[in-house]
Each structure stands twice: as C-alpha cells, then as structure tokens.
Image: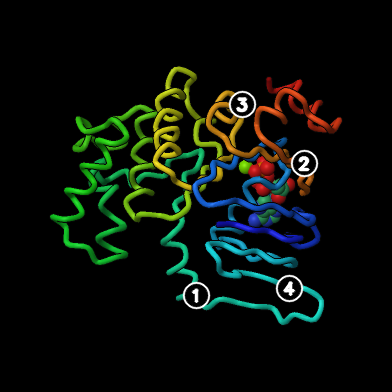
Amino acid sequence: MVKAEGVHKSFGTAHILKGIDLEVAPREVFCLIGPSGSGKSTFLRCINHLEKINAGRLYVDGDLVGYRQKGDRLHELKDSEIALKRRDIGMVFQRFNLFPHMTAVENVMEAPVQVKGEAKAVARVRAEQLLDRVGLSDKAKHYPAQLSGGQQQRVAIARALAMEPKLMLFDEPTSALDPELVGDVLDVMRGLAEDGMTMIVVTHEMGFAREVGDALVFMDDGVVVETGHPRDVLTNPQHDRTKSFLSKVL
Ligand code: ADP
Ligand code: MG
C-alpha cells in the first residue's frame, strides 16, 4: 500500500527526512514512533501529497507518486491527479479540525456531498451509520463545541471514513486528549483495524502499538532506526537510540 525507498525531504536547508525506507502492506496496522522533530508528521504529509519529496521513490497504493533518482526525471503529478489520489487517503490529526459551524452529521457528510457530488439524503444516511460506528449515534445533531475532545476526534475519524479511504493516516490522534478520553478513540481505531483497514499510526500509545500493531518503526532524526513486530521492538529493542527513547515513554 505504501513503499518508500530512500525518501528525502528538506525544507530549505533543513534536511528532515534522510532516506526513509519502509513498506506498509494492505490491511496492516503500521505504527510509527519517535522523538518530537524526527520527521514523522512530515513523512505522513508526503504520503498524503501535502509535501513533495526531494529524492527517492514513494509509492502509494501502487502508484509512484514522487521520485527523483540519478538518471530519472522528476515525476510530478498534476494538481487534478493529486486531488483524486488524496480522496483515497483519510487523515486524522492531533487537533480535530472539525468545521465549527456544522453539526457532527454535517461534518461527516461534507466531503461526500461537496467532493464526490453525492446526494444529500444518501450522504446523511451513511454519515449517521458512520457516527453509529464510532459510538456517537446520539450526537449527530451536536456542534463540535458541544462535544468532548474524544467525541470530536471520533467525529473526525467518521468524517475521514466517509470518503471510503483505502488508507488511513493517524498523526498522534490521542495526544491532545484528556487521559480518560483516549480509550474510546483507541477502541474505534482497534475496530477499524479488525475490519481490515490499512492504517499508519503515529502514536505514543505503546499499549495500542503492542496490541493492535502489525509493525512498529522507530524513527529518529529523519531515518528509520529500527523496524519489527511491535512486541519485539518494545520488549527487546536492538538499538541504543530505541532503548533510550522507550525508557522515556514506557
Ligand atoms: P515530528 O512529527 O516527528 O515531531 P515533524 O515532521 O513535524 O516531526 O518535523 C520535523 C522537522 O521538520 C522539525 O524540525 C520541523 O520544525 C521541521 N518542519 C516541518 N514542517 C516544516 C515546514 N513546512 N517548513 C520548515 N520546517 C518544517
Ligand atoms: Mg508530528
């Protein structure tokens, strides 16, 4: 579903991603951990076409979306192609970014109606089903300000799912939540995993990574330091940098 080969990304003179190699299989729950500033969000943004890579190859859902190797010409997608590809990728951020002037159900309906041109009545029924799936069928008519952070984040997940994505990217989805609200969001994500959704999850929730994750990557300073099964990486890290990071977060 995603394959990175020597992916580099710089912002001006700041070299952020320094040759990322990794592979995410369909239906896999792929967890990404690492210190703040190591490039995790930047990498997700590259996958989601929000940033262009400077070197290497990046495949998303079988398409080569960006490459620049010696001898290759730079492959650039047109904006219209990027817009189409981005429809297949759902993204959930630390901050929920719901439209404040729309109810929960309207937030979930928005993209299918505006982007896909779905009929409102059809989109509403599906949005209600999705809210039910994230445990919020009774909150459909609430505005974001009337919902807790955890409920808003679950609406945000339902909104991403409304576009029927092939891949879901989660960027620290529970980091902004009060501790008692984290569990409900992780339960929704666990349910998605059980339904076979391909997911890349940047998280500090090591319990989730251990129980739900199929693969765990530890990133530091723009490189992949260690990859493995979550249980192996978490209980028996091989690299000093991984050990030092885990000793701080576990
Ligand atoms: P992480 O998500 O692992 O905390 P980020 O990918 O957000 O790390 O950031 C990695 C580094 O890239 C940081 O030093 C950050 O300041 C820098 N960075 C991210 N986006 C930009 C940008 N648009 N312009 C300049 N620097 C950026
Ligand atoms: Mg980040």
CB within 8 Å, label 1 to label 3 = no
Query: Which amino acid type corresponds to the residue marked 2 in the rendered image?
Result: Asp
Residue for point 77% across, 49% down: 222
Which x, y percent locates residue 14?
79, 56
| Helix, strand or loop at mark 3 | helix
Check the picture and name the quadrant holding the N terminus. Answer: bottom right
Viewer-nearest of labels 4 and 1? 4
Q: Residue at x 61, y 64 (%)?
A: 59
Name the residue carrying label 3.
206
Sequence-wise, the earlier of marks 3 and 4 is 4
Q: Earlier along the polypeptide chain: callout 1 or callout 2?
A: 1
* Placement of 129 over or under 69, stated as above or below: above
**Residue 98 image point, x, y percent:** 36, 44
Q: Residue at x 74, y 54 (%)?
A: 20
Alpha-carbon neighbours of circle 3 within 10 Å: few (<14), some, or many (≥20)?
Answer: some
Q: Which residue is mark 2?
A: 220
Query: Marks 2/3: CA distance?
Result: 17 Å
Q: Which of pointers 4 and 1 lies earlier in the amino acid sequence?
A: 4
Determine the CA span between mark 1 and mark 3: 37 Å
Q: In this figure, which residue is indicated by the disc labeled 1? A: 79
What whole-number distance in Å separates the C-alpha atoms at marks 3 and 4?
Answer: 35 Å
Residue displayed at 47% across by 66% down: 85
Q: Looking at the image, is mark 1 or mark 3 nearer the viewer?
A: 3
Name which residue type carries label 4.
Arg
